[in-house]
Image: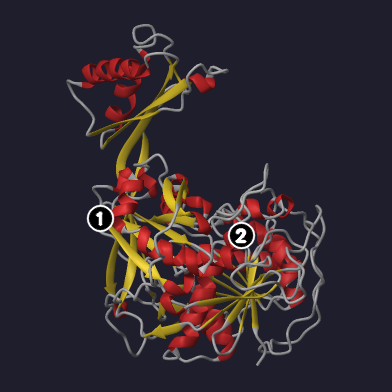
Amino acid sequence: MSALRIGNASGFYGDRFGAVREMLTGGRLDVLTGDYLAELTMLILGRDLLKDPSAGYAKTFLRQMEEGLGLAHDRGTRIVVNAGGLNPAGLAEALRGLAGRLGLPTRVAHVEGDRLPGGAGVLTANAYLGGAGIAACLTAGADVVVTGRVTDAALVTGPAQWWFGWGPEEYDRLAGAVVAGHVLECGTQATGGNYAFFREHDAKLLLRPGFPLAEVHEDGTAVVTKHPGTGGVVDVGTVTAQLLYETSGARYAGPDVTARLDSVRLTREGPDRVRIDGVRGEAPPATLKVGRCRLGGHRNEVVFVLTGLDVEAKAALVREQIHDALAQDPPADVRWDLARTDREDAGTEETASALLRLVVRDPDPEKAGRTLTGAAIELALASYPGFHVTAPPGRGAPYGVFETAYVPAGDVPHTAVLPDGTRVAVPVPPVTRALEPVPEPELPEPLPPGPTVRVPLGRIAGARSGDKGGDANVGVWVRTEAQWRWLAHTLTVARFRALLPETADLDVTRHVLPNLRAVNFTVAGILGEGVASQARFDPQAKALGEWLRSRHVDVPADLLPAERPGAPADFPSADRPGGPEGPPPDGRPGVPKGLPTAGRSGGPEEPPSAGRPARPEGPPPTHPDLPEGPA
């Protein structure tokens, strides 16, 4: 059977609006997916649903389908998205109405059952479902499948189960699809977006990275690539970065299968082509993760600007003044952070200024709002010299809290609602396995002693970081065996804590992934109660890894790449001669040049694969050439 060509057109609610059209017209796809949900998104959709019972789904997707339904129909491409959010049935009905207005025979199905009772104070509670419900909908002939909260990888495992007819116990195949799905789920993060070594590549390529696709094979192996002529880069580094994103240890558990990340092998197959193979899988756990969002109270902040001399004394004065003003009835939580962004003898006022950030939280909107606002405004003529703030303080705004729990999979009514309205109960996996820690693998031999140079860690190591509730993960990797021998012994938990003092008193766990030449750190509690609570300057830990890369360490001199004057460090690259996998087959270094111009369709348009399961035939309907919506 032919490979399943499956692409992604969205990594979050608000991603590039035109990506659906780019992916549908840029080359052949059997399935197009889109990930619209995140922890913060569920809170936003929950508040939407409170205002309007017919809302609760990603409205952007519905606008994208004004053109996308016709394009997908003409090309024989199925669409699978989690844009249903808290109301997949409502989105499915809206899509049927849209298809009717466009004169398209689009068959729409949806998956539900993830919404669970949340209890007092809980705004949303959703179980993370697997791909079996999606597979049932596609098998019943659906052209579009919308879901609520499924795992991000389920958008790939479901179509793969349908395409190849995999059973629930074909763990290695399912695990391969999970890994491919994890690489695709964040869109352009797999094609050079947010990439630590971005300076290695042609800047023009990174202006508008193309979205990724995977060629998934019947044995579970896959090749990650992108449409020809699109921007961005796919190499072993970009795929490694995304594999480490928002993961932790060797066992990556999900409702379909537990994928062993320590078994993943990545190989450069050609320009912008990376093969994923060797993935092993195990039976999934008996429980499903549940994400719960609740309103935590109200939040307000003021950022004081401290310019020029005596920054510390100015900060101490205004802190004491605010403390006195709030002393009679203080908010429940008061936090101060001083960011020394100022420079000595600065050439501009902005670069002579530091920022003192005050954040308060309280269940009472008055304490977080009017009380703080009044205290701050009254200091305008009575505090430190040069007093001003970045913006006038406002009323307290509600903030959310994200929590996780686990429930037996059998307690969740996972249901596929087929195009004809038939409701099919999706069975739980027949075999489950309790998650157990994986013993730390044997480390490589350490490097012999030699001369070192004190440089930023990022001179040889890449990193990517992100959030999971109140925790953060930081994946760090290198790209030669010698560098790996150094990293594995050097970047211990103790060294990690020393380099990032914010983590010194937190629970930090290190996971070793030799096949990826990577270590992955989980930092418990650094994000407080999750992104919606905005407990930290970088509430999603997006730049935690870049902070780590900027810290100075002693690196063996012979591990450092040579630097060209006035140019970025010449790191060994998988797409350049001298990288860990050697030169490209054709001997040409680098990647394809050029970006598509505005309005360009992308690569050639090809007919659907002959291996795609058949769909009912009929004359292609006409539909209006609707304009692209706003980004």
Classify the position of the N terminus by image quarter. bottom right
| Position of residue 367 in the picture relative to residue 109 (left or right) | left
**Mark carried by residue 448:** none
Quarter-of-image position of residue 613: bottom right
- Viewer-side residue, 314 vs 422: 314
Question: Relative to 21, is 527 on the left or the right?
Answer: left
**Which residue was labeled with disc 2?**
188
Q: Residue at x 29, y 76 (%)?
A: 439
**What's the residue at 36%, 72% (across, down)?**
443
Outermost residue, top direction? 381
Q: Residue at x 48, y 60 (%)?
A: 37
Residue, x 37% and y 73% (percent of image)? 250
The answer to whether residue 541 shows anywhere in this view is: no
x then y, percent, for residue 457: 46, 51
Task: Categorize mark 2 by other alpha carbons within 10 Å: few (<14), some (14-19), many (20+).
Answer: many
Q: Nearer the viewer, residue 118 or 613?
A: 613
Residue 628's x, y, as percent?
Answer: 74, 54
The count of marks equals 2
Proximity of marks 1 and 2: CB atoms separated by less than 8 Å: no
In the displayed structure, 539 sits above or below 461; it is above
Residue type pointed to by label 1: Asp
